[in-house]
């Protein structure tokens, strides 16, 4: 289940919220801005925030009146099978009321919350009250084949009918259902694709593990490797798996997941199979697979993967030219060669998910400049990697994450750490200020990936989430100095020689670019900015407009305008970005004595000043 969000409207709700969050790992606190503090996310629009969470399938626990939740979410109520749990909790913790999500575990979630608050949940579902069970909402590990029949089936039981159980399901045996092995109404638990009816509910236990080993990745140019052409990635593999399930008389609903080696994690065929079956993917390391191969005396990696996933024994195997598959199921005996294991597979403790690495930019400083994409990544990440100053920019979005801090000059070591963490199946966010692709960590991560190329890194899912760069923020604060052609140059000579920097400054000055200078001055580098000014003065007028923006989005922010002639090292530091105008850049005097700076969109040589 997606981690829940606990919604607070006032500071008085925080004690109850902290009790609730203690039993809901991964839950986040959303608090109304101005009325709450020490929350993960502050919001200003209650209705819009709740509706967005609900639409995204996020369980909502509102510490507020039931009425406000109902009225807020009423316009979105269309499909009860897709509704996430919604629960109202009294501010003093005296009441826990499940409102929505009856088919997605709301009653169990309400019981969990009520237990920590030492109250009885206000569950009103008749079947749940009488039998201690909701037939439409089976526990994790079981899927109901005919949910549309569950309501009438439960009505029959409430009216006095008894039920016969076929198969093994402790959660049904331990309930208060009127069980009678001679009953006409039947609940069947089976991996087989049997026919269900209004008097026969069928539950499929998630006991089938599909082990996949992609032995020869398709080359570039293969018809299936080109997006939008041919049958697409995985079509042959999907057909093979579906045929295997049919031959073994196994219901696709009993597939717990697709399992593979971490070395194959990037192969899109895996995701195609998982999507076709609507199941997750989990991975085993080469060492784990090798151990199972040794224990079971098999040389087939897919066989070992399936056995590792199911704790069973192999009974079926088929191969195609570049794909092999083995399956193992958890219970029931069949004549065909299929491996068996005793219980539904716990997908959360079997293998590990594909590692994710997001390289994000927080913007120059304040949270207002952080993109929704970056905020979403920070909410979901398990680990944050970065320079301590930049990690501090994430604010409350960093709460509950593992922090991995390092010195600002350890970019390559930081990139290696992030890749290693992601290779363990974690969701890692590498945090940069500004934009991660502009003099920041994105290039460092790809540099490490390129130079070291560890096999276990190849399966990591990597994304770069852009942020507002310092030059964009500086330009926005003063007007539009980047309104025409511009370039960016770093004055740091740590990673490139000054001779190269000098050539680029000269070329940019000659080409009449607006120039954004990053890293202009540090404690060890005091002369480079003065030399930069001297180079520019060979090609630019002394009155050329220069913008110095410091601590953008943070305490002590300043944006000042000088002339090129007055530019001096003592005016800047490493937290300053400098924008040097072109010959066309203009200033507009404002009535309050300040100025706007802009560079016209039109560039006419005959009007050069």
Image (cartoon, helix red, strand yellow):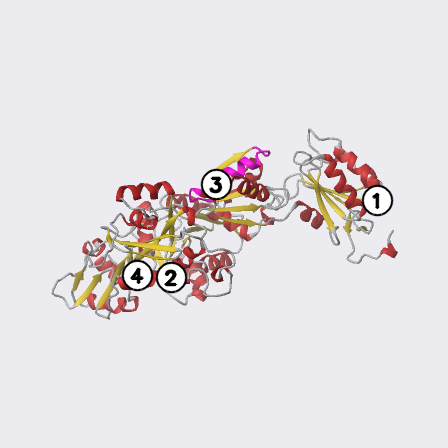
Q: Which label number is shown at residue 238? A: 2
Is most of the magenta stretch helix, strand or loop?
helix
* Residue 376 x/y as whole percent: 50, 51
Question: Considering the numbered disc 1 on the image, is that residue within a helix, a strand or a loop?
Answer: loop
Is residue 210 placed above or below 154 in the rendered structure? above
- Percent across and percent down for residue 384 are 50, 41
**Residue placed under numbered mark 1 in the picture:** 540
> Dot 4 corresponds to which residue?
244
The span picked out in magenta is 407-427
93 relative to 380 in the view: left or right: left
Q: In the picture shown, does residue 70 fall above or below 449? A: below
Q: Is residue 509 part of the magenta span, yes or no? A: no
Q: Mark 3 vs mark 4: which is more N-terminal?
A: 4
Q: Percent from the top left, x then y, of residue 86?
A: 39, 57
Query: How many marks are shown on the rendered structure?
Result: 4
State which tag comes first along the sequence, 2 or 4.
Answer: 2
Marks 2 and 1, Cα distance to the nearest angstrom? 64 Å
Dot 3 falls on a residue whose secondary structure is loop
- For mark 4, give the secondary structure: helix
Residue ID at (45%, 58%): 56
Asked whether, in this view, residue 41 is left or right of residue 334, the answer is right
């Amino acid at each position: 289940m997606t981690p829940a969000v606990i919604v607070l409207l006032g500071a008085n709700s925080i004690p109850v919220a902290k009790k609730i969050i203690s039993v809901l790992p991964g839950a986040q606190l959303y608090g109304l801005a101005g009325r709450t503090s020490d929350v993960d996310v502050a919001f200003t629009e209650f209705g819009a925030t709740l509706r967005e969470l609900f639409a995204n399938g996020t369980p909502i626990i509102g510490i507020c009146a039931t009425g406000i939740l109902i009225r807020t979410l009423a316009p979105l109520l269309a499909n009860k099978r897709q509704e996430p749990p919604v629960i109202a909790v009294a501010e003093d913790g005296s009441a826990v009321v499940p409102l929505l999500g009856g088919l997605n575990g709301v009653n169990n979630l309400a019981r969990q919350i009520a237990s920590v608050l030492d109250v009885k949940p206000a569950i009103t579902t008749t079947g749940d009250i009488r039998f201690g069970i909701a037939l439409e909402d089976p526990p994790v590990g079981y899927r109901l084949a005919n949910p549309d029949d569950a309501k009438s089936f439960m009505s029959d039981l409430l009216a006095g009918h008894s039920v016969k159980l076929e198969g093994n399901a402790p959660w049904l045996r331990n309930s208060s259902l009127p069980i009678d092995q001679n009953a006409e109404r039947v609940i069947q638990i089976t991996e087989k694709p049997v026919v269900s009816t209004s008097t026969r509910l069928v539950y499929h236990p998630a006991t089938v593990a599909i082990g996949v080993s992609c032995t020869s990745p398709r080359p570039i140019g293969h018809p299936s490797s080109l997006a939008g052409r041919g049958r697409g990635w995985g079509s042959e593999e999907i057909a093979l798996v579906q045929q295997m399930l049919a031959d073994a008389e196994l219901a696709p609903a009993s597939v717990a997941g697709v399992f593979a080696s971490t070395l194959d994690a990037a192969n899109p065929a895996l995701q195609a199979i998982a999507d076709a079956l609507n199941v997750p993917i989990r991975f085993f390391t080469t060492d784990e697979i090798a151990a199972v191969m040794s224990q079971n005396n098999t040389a087939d990696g897919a066989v070992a993967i399936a056995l590792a996933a199911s704790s069973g024994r192999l009974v079926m195997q088929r191969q195609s030219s570049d794909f092999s598959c083995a399956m193992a199921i958890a219970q029931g005996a069949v004549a065909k060669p299929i491996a068996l294991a005793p219980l539904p597979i716990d997908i959360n403790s079997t293998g590990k998910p594909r590692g994710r690495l997001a390289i994000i930019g927080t913007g120059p400083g304040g949270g207002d400049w952080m993109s929704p994409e970056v905020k979403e990544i920070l909410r979901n990440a398990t680990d944050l990697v970065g320079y301590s100053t930049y990690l501090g920019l994430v604010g409350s979005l960093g709460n509950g994450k593992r922090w991995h801090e390092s010195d600002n000059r350890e970019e390559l070591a930081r990139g290696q750490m992030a890749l290693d963490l992601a290779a363990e199946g974690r969701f890692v966010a590498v945090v940069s200020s500004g934009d991660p692709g502009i003099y920041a960590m994105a290039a460092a991560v790809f540099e490490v990936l390129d130079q070291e190329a560890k096999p276990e890194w190849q399966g990591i899912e990597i994304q770069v989430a852009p942020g507002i760069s310092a030059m964009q923020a500086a330009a926005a604060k003063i007007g539009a100095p980047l309104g025409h052609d511009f370039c960016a140059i770093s004055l740091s000579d740590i990673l490139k020689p000054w001779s190269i920097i000098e050539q680029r400054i000269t070329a940019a000055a000659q080409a009449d670019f607006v120039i954004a200078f990053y890293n202009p001055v540090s404690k060890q580098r005091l002369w480079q900015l003065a030399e930069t000014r001297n180079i520019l003065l060979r090609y630019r007028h002394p009155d050329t407009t220069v913008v110095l923006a410091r601590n953008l989005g943070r305490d002590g922010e300043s944006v000042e305008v000088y002339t090129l002639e007055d530019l001096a090292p003592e005016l800047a530091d490493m937290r300053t970005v400098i924008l040097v105008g072109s010959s066309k850049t203009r200033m507009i005097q404002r009535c309050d004595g300040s100025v706007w700076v802009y560079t016209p969109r039109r560039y006419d040589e005959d009007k050069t000043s």
